[in-house]
Every structure is written in C-alpha cells, then in structure tokens.
Image (cartoon, helix red, strand yellow):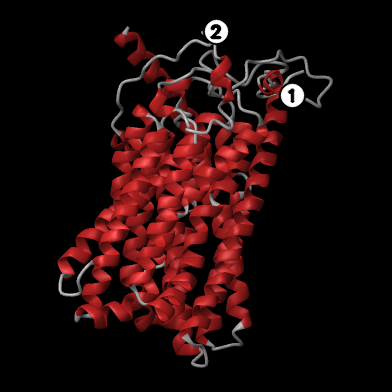
Amino acid sequence: MSKLEESTQPPIDMVDLNDKTSTEPVEKAYSIYTSKEKWFIVTLVSFAGIFSPFTANIYFPAIPTLVSAFHKSTELINLTVTMYMILQGLSPMFFGSFADFHGRRPIFVLCLFVLCLSCVGLALVPTNAYWLLMVLRCVQATGSASTIALGAGVIGDIAIPAERGGFFGFYSLGPMLGPAFGPVIGGALSDGLGWRSIFWFLCIASGFACIVMLLFLPETLRQLVGDGSIAPSTIYRPIIPIISRHYSEWTSGSPRPPRRKFRNPLLLFKNLDILMLLLFNGIVYSVFYAVTASISSLFAEIYPFLTDSTIGLCYLAIGVGTAVGSAGTGKVLDWDFQRAKKAYIESHGSESMKNESGELKDDFPIEKARLMSMSYATLILVSAGMGYGWCLQKRVHIAAPLVLQFIIGALSMSVMNPTQTLILDLVPGQGSSVTACNNIVRCLLGAVSVSVIDLILNSLKPGFTYVLLNGIIIISMPLIYLVIRMGPRFRRRRREADVKTLVAQS
C-alpha cells in the first residue's frame, strides 16, 4: 500500500479500532491527514501561538530601563503594557472571525508579518517619541495576539472530539511558555545588549515564523478544503507541500462544503453556556496572571539576595509547570472522552454518537466528558495558591514558593485547557471566533488583575491577597456544574436555530 493510500484510509472516527466486538459502522474520515501530519500541523501553530504571551512578557524586565530612556514615569511606561493587553484581547475578534470565513493560512502569515514590522519600528523608535512607543506597542499586540485564536481554529478543523484534548494540550505549550521564558530572555537581552535588542530579537523570531508558515502550513478551513482533500487556490497552498501532497492527486470526489455566511463573533456571547465557560476560564487566568506579574516585585522584596537575572530564572518554575500541566491534561482529556464514549455506546447500543451533520448528538454528555476531572484539579489549585501566598508572607525558604509555583502552573493548565477544548466542541466551524471571545474575556480580566495586584498586596499582604483571589475561583465553580447540567439543552437550541437558518437561506 502506498503512503498516499495509507494516509487516506478512512479511520473509524468515534469507535475504538481495538474493540473487536464493536458493530458500529465505519464512518468517513473527518480529515485525510494522518496522525503524524496532524501533529506536524499542531506543532506549527503552537510555535506561532507562542508570540502573543511571549511578546508581552519579554518586555517586562526592560520597563525600568525604558523609564530612564524615555524620561517618563513608571506609570506611563506601564500604560504601554495595559494598552498592549487591551489590544491583545480585542484584535482576535477581528482576525479570528475573518479566519473562520476566509481561511487560516493567509491570516497567520499576515499577523506574523505585522508583528515583524512593528518590532522593527519599536527597535528604532526615538526616545523623545513616547507617543510612537505607545502606538507601535498597540500595533505589535494586534499582530501577535491573534495567533492563539487561529491555532485553536486549526485544531478544530483537523481533529475529531476524541483527539482534540491531546492536540490542544500540546498546542497550549507554546502560548503558556511565553510568560515563563519571556522575562528570562528579556532580562538577559536588556542587560547585555540594551532594550532595543529585545525588539530586534522579536523581529528575527517572528520573521522566521512567518517564513515557516508560508513554506509549510496548509489551509485547513473546512469550508475551503473540506476534509483536506479539496485543492484550494494557490494562495492557500504551502510553497513546500510536505504534507499537502494530496493536492497532486486530488479529484472531485470530495464535495466542497457549503459556503457559510460571515458570523459576528460577538453573537457567541449570547450563548449562556459558552459565556459561563469563558467567565470561569477568565477568572482562573486572571489569578494565574496575578501570580506571574507579581513574582519579580515580591521575590525582590522577600529574598533580597536575588539579582535581576536570578529573579528571571524564578519564572522557570511556573513555566515548567505549565508545560507539564498542558501535556498531562491533554492525555486526561482524551481518556475522559473515551470513558464517556464507552458509557454512551453501552447505553445506546451500536448507535452512532453523531447526527446527520457529523456533529455530536445532543444527548452525548460532552460537557461532562470534558469537565469531569476539572473540579478536583480546581480544589488542589486553590489550596496551592493560598499556600503560596502564606509562604511568601512568612518568608519561608525560597524552595517552597518555587515548588508551589510549579504546582500552580500545572494545575492552572488542568483547569483552563478543558474549558478551552470544550468551547471548540460546542461551536464547530467557529473555532477561531470562539477562541477570540475567550481571549478577550481573559485578557481584559488579566489586565484588571495586573492593574490592582500591587494595591491588594500593599493592603492585605501576600497571604490574604491569594486567599482572596483563590476564593473568587471557589465562588465561580458553580458555573461549571451549571454548564454540565444545562449544556445539552443549549446545544440542542443552537442546532435547531442553525437548521432554521439554513432552511431560510435555501
């Protein structure tokens, strides 16, 4: 059997191939890509996704230097951080929804190109032009922020629900490593080569990423390429088609999906289940960001023997934790889905879990499958967060807060990744748009937490500060149980509304 034939053999989407007793019929493959090809695509988009948080956090160590260079107060330089986070939340609403309609590949290349050009401007900005620094930081955020939403949309295009957990867990490694390694690299560059070197580094890195995406990333938007077997126009094809060799032997056997009309991503906020998920995820993210944003100031005060470089290294603990948590959560999500699938098949016989449109049936408990393990992780996360605050207040040995940082990083991923995977399941075809909605909620809540964390720390001290923040997570936990209980009803209403819309359009 040739490699092409092997790669296009239709797997059983929702049935365990090792289950010899299964009588469920073989379904058409959701995507023509093999498992290795899917992992390659996910690796590409994960690499691009790192730039949104990385570009934000690499800037932090240079703030004192910029205060001196631009002769502005710390508050004014911090305003460039606040504006960055606001644009970081808003811009994916445009680019994400645009990618859901016009394609992932060209928007990926455009965003990275804009980021590269903005970094050139920032590296050359004169120190008597504070206004230009502010404008270019906003442009920089516009270019970098949307890569996370675009990558999530790609995963929704190529992966069935049974494998999305693993892919999304690996994909999250890129975006979540930025807050950990950004300050380390930024501090080293600023100390060794000056603050302008930070932006030259970002220019080279984003330019390289833009070229990589241009060379290798295939178009995955299903309304353009279907399961991947429909050859798109030239602009959507990679220059070096390593995994798009299928185009050379493409035939008209695969029907092109119907062209959807543009959907306003803001309308997704009208869905109560999605809104509850976004709010809970945003609260957890804001507490996580409050921890990372306060590491340098707290550690410098409590452990005065630390230098700027060693403080930067302290970020590695929470960074490695996020990496471990992302990888582990992906496996747990896939395992939980298989458990739910097995229980569903046992109760419904050999009946398919999909409806005629290829989506999960309304009575399949996808919400429970994604969120069943999250409550335990949330309780441990809250306990670790409170312990972290009291360790800092009691000025215990530095090893204790670093270990707790690792746990906080790992468990934050164990809480956030399931909700982000679930929202992809709930609105198929709008992966980038719903991830953009997630991004705006968590970025705005994160901006609020960064703005007030120093005020709260000064008033309550670290111990009670992190009791307060983690207490907010506990108070918001009922949102998850409401989604599990009411989610199927909301899914059914959305499906019925979509059917009515299609009938009206036809």
132 in relation to 237, above or below = below
- Give x and y (percent) for residue 280: 44, 51
Secondary-structure class at tag 2: loop
Q: Which element carries disc 1, helix, strand or loop? A: helix
Residue 229 x %, y %:
54, 18
Look at mark 2 in the image and give the residue it sits on. 253
* Snapshot quadrant of residue 198: bottom left
Q: Going 53% across and 41% down the picture, which residue do you hit?
A: 421
At x 41%, y 37%, the residue is 432
The type of residue carrying mark 1 is: Glu
**Residue 104 in sight:** yes
Q: List the single residue furthest toward the front.
A: 240
Residue closest to the eye, 130 or 484:
130
327 with respect to 54 (left or right)? right
Whole-number angstrom distance, CA of label 1 to CA of label 2 = 35 Å
**Percent x, y for residue 390?**
53, 81
Quadrant (top left, top right, bottom left, bottom right) of the N terminus: top right
Q: Give the camera-side residue of 107 and 271.
A: 107
Q: Against 281, is 472 above or below?
A: below
Residue at x-position 54% and y-position 88%: 394
- Look at mark 1 in the image and give the residue it sits on: 346
Residue with the most extreme bottom position: 305
Foreground of the two, 378 or 140:
140
Residue 378 is left or right of residue 154, and the answer is right
Q: Is residue 459 above or below residue 166?
A: below
The correct choice, above or below, for 388 with respect to 319 in the image is below
Q: Quadrant of the C terminus?
A: top left
Q: Quick one: label 2, few (<14), some, or many (20+) residues within 10 Å?
A: few
Nearest-to-viewer mark from 1 and 2: 2
Task: Give the mark nearest the N terminus, 1 or 2.
Answer: 2
Whether tag 1 and tag 2 are in contact, CB under 8 A, the answer is no
Q: Position of residue 387 (x, y in %)?
A: 57, 75
